[in-house]
Amino acid sequence: MGNLFGRKRRSRVTEQDKAVLQLKQQRDKLRQYQKRISLNLERERALARELLRDGKKEKAMLLLKKKRYQEQLLDKTENQISNLERMVQDIEFTQIEMKVIEGLKIGNECLNKMHQVMSIEEVERIIGETQDAVEYQRQIDELLAGSLTEEDEDAILEELDAITQEQMELPEVPSEPLPEKTPEASPVKNRPKPELVAAS
């Protein structure tokens, strides 16, 4: 029992998966930061309008400078998000490439084992035997199809006649004369009927 619970299960999460997760978390945090700055920009713009209406031009100017700085931060944040997303895509694509390479490696090992089992000499021998068998079958097909020479045809006809003669030979005729009349069967004696025997 201790062995069952003491065994460490091997995690399927790779270092690349962890890296992708961290990058996505960073991207999400930057997007939240973007939303916060966008809301601040709207508020500061509205506040700058109010300050201008109230005649506080210098304060409005200061607020617009702050707004401009935050807009630049927003642009930088957008670039960072793009970089993070590109990096996530690169890692994910590299993982796919690694799986493809691993598959190719396994395929090559399998092919090499198969090549060790079947050498070129073995393949050549099998192909040669196959070609011989095909050629032999072709010859049989030609014979059956009637592509025989006249001599072959004559020999076949002679053999056919000989076989026919053997089958047609009649049995020998007996030399003794046949009996003229067959002897009649001896008559059966009259027996008393069963009823009469019982009555006496």
Image (spheres, helix red, strand yellow):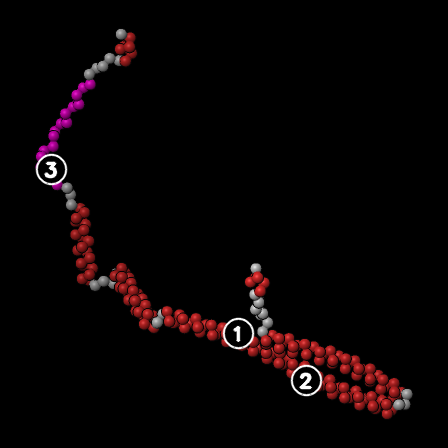
Amino acid at circle 2 = Asn
Amino acid at circle 3 = Pro
Residue 162 visible in rendering: yes
Q: Are marks 1 and 3 in contact (CB under 8 Å)?
A: no
The residue that disc 3 covers is 174
Q: Is residue 5 above or below residue 184?
A: below
- What secondary structure do most residues of the magenta stretch adopt? loop
Q: CA distance from mark 1 to mark 2?
A: 30 Å
> Is residue 155 found left or right of 137 in the rendered image?
left
Amino acid at circle 1 = Lys
Numbered disc 1: secondary structure:
helix
Sequence-wise first label, 1 or 3: 1
- Magenta range is 172-188
Q: Quadrant of residue 148?
A: bottom left
Q: Quadrant of residue 70?
A: bottom right
Q: Residue 31: x and y, percent?
A: 71, 79
Numbered disc 3: secondary structure:
loop
The residue that disc 2 covers is 79
Residue ID at (58%, 64%): 6
Mark identifier at residue 99: 1
Q: Residue 104: x and y, percent?
A: 48, 74
Q: CA distance from mark 2 to mark 3?
A: 124 Å
> Is residue 167 found left or right of 74 in the rendered image?
left
